[in-house]
């Protein structure tokens, strides 16, 4: 079993500019794994004092939505995590620009916002880390893609990995591959949920209770994922081991193949990546339209 470090890995003060569910998931993961001390985190949002009070009570972090305090906090932050909605990014980044020092590290969890766009809105070649976590980060089983601008040094790279490894695994990629990653791990949980919906419905139609069918489906998916993870075998090998010639599993696989299941999944991932690019381009156009 891995032991948690007795001294937090991150000494820098981190400010979360946005206090939504993803920001909370990351904060919870870092604190639970002693990656950072709770008093080294400040969370900012636009207006909800109740939300900030909830986060302060739950995690022991600091929080503010006072405009003057926010400006001072951002000015002095060593690391700023951009966690606001894309529609709020332009205003936030333009307001942030005059407050920044060249060595302040910007980490973005905003979907569709490229490093070039962030630096363009800031008006400076700030060190920027672009990330794409997924929703499983909320239970510590996330998968996060990470891309670095050329201004990010080794210390910044290590810090980003420490942050996101606290909520799952990380994969460092070239930024142009971020949309492909989105198609696999960013949106991937939804594909699995959709298949689970179908499996559960099949069980119910076959006479199982909804509770039985869902429980069996969940355990099957969990067990299959753990088998790949723990045995180190690839999915194709494991599938072949449970697919006896002329058996029931083979009949099921053949039915999936009649629907071109394999290529349909690939097409879905590709379309997700393509749509992510389209949305990113639309976000960039909207953010710069008034410049």
Image (cartoon, rainbow, N blue to C red):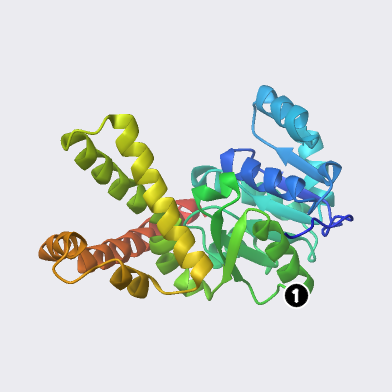
Residue 6 spot, x, y in % from top left: 88, 55
Which percent across, then down, holds residue 207? 18, 33
Could you tell me which secondary element the residue under label 1 belongs to?
loop
Give the residue displayed 22% in from the left and 69% down from the top: 244
> Vertically, is 94 above or below 231?
above
x, y percent for residue 59: 76, 35
Q: Residue at x 73, y 39 (%)?
A: 43
- Count the numbered circles shown: 1
Q: In the image, is 116 to the left or to the right of 103?
A: left
Quarter the N terminus occupies: bottom right
Q: Quadrant of residue 68?
A: top right
* Crowd class of label 1 (few under 14; some 14 to 19; many from 20; radius 10 Å): few
Question: In the rendered image of this protein, does residue 174 appear above or below residue 49?
Answer: below
Residue furthest to the left in view is 258
Image quadrant of residue 44? top right
Residue at figure coordinates x 79%, y 58% from the top left: 3
Question: Is residue 157 among what the camera can see?
Answer: yes
Q: Report x, y in % for residue 193.
A: 35, 46
Residue 61 drawn above or below residue 222: above
Q: Is residue 280 visible?
A: no
Q: Quadrant of residue 146?
A: bottom right
- Residue visible at 81% across and 34% down in the picture: 60
> Where is mark 1, residue-wise?
153
Seen from the viewer's position, the closer of residues 162 and 271 is 162
- Of 49 and 135, nearer the camera is 135
Residue furthest to the top: 50
């Amino acid at each position: 079993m891995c032991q948690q470090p007795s001294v937090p890995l991150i000494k820098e003060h981190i400010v979360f500019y946005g206090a939504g569910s993803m920001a909370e998931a990351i904060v919870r993961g870092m604190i639970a794994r002693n990656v950072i001390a709770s008093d080294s985190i400040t969370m900012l949002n636009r207006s909800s004092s109740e939300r900030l009070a909830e986060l302060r009570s739950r995690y022991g972090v600091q929080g503010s939505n006072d405009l003057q305090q926010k400006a001072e906090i951002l000015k002095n932050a060593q690391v700023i995590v951009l966690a606001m909605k894309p529609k709020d990014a332009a205003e936030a980044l333009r307001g942030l620009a005059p407050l920044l020092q060249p060595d302040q590290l910007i980490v973005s969890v905003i979907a569709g916002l490229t490093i070039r766009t962030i630096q363009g809105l800031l008006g400076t070649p700030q060190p920027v880390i672009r990330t794409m976590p997924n929703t499983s980060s909320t239970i510590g089983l996330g998968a996060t893609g990470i891309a670095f601008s050329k201004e990010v040094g080794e210390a910044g790279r290590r810090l980003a990995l420490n942050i996101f490894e606290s909520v799952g695994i990380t994969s460092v990629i070239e930024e142009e591959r971020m949309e492909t990653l989105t198609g696999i791990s960013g949106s991937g949980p939804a594909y699995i949920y959709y298949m689970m919906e179908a499996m559960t419905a099949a069980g119910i139609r076959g006479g199982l209770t909804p509770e039985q069918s869902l429980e069996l489906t969940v355990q099957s998916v969990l067990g299959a994922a753990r088998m790949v993870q723990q045995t180190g075998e690839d999915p194709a090998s494991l599938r072949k081991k449970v697919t006896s010639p002329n058996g029931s599993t083979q009949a099921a696989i053949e039915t999936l193949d009649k629907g071109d299941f394999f290529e349909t999944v690939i097409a879905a991932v590709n379309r997700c990546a393509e749509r992510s690019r389209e949305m990113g381009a639309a976000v960039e156009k909207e953010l710069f339209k008034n410049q």
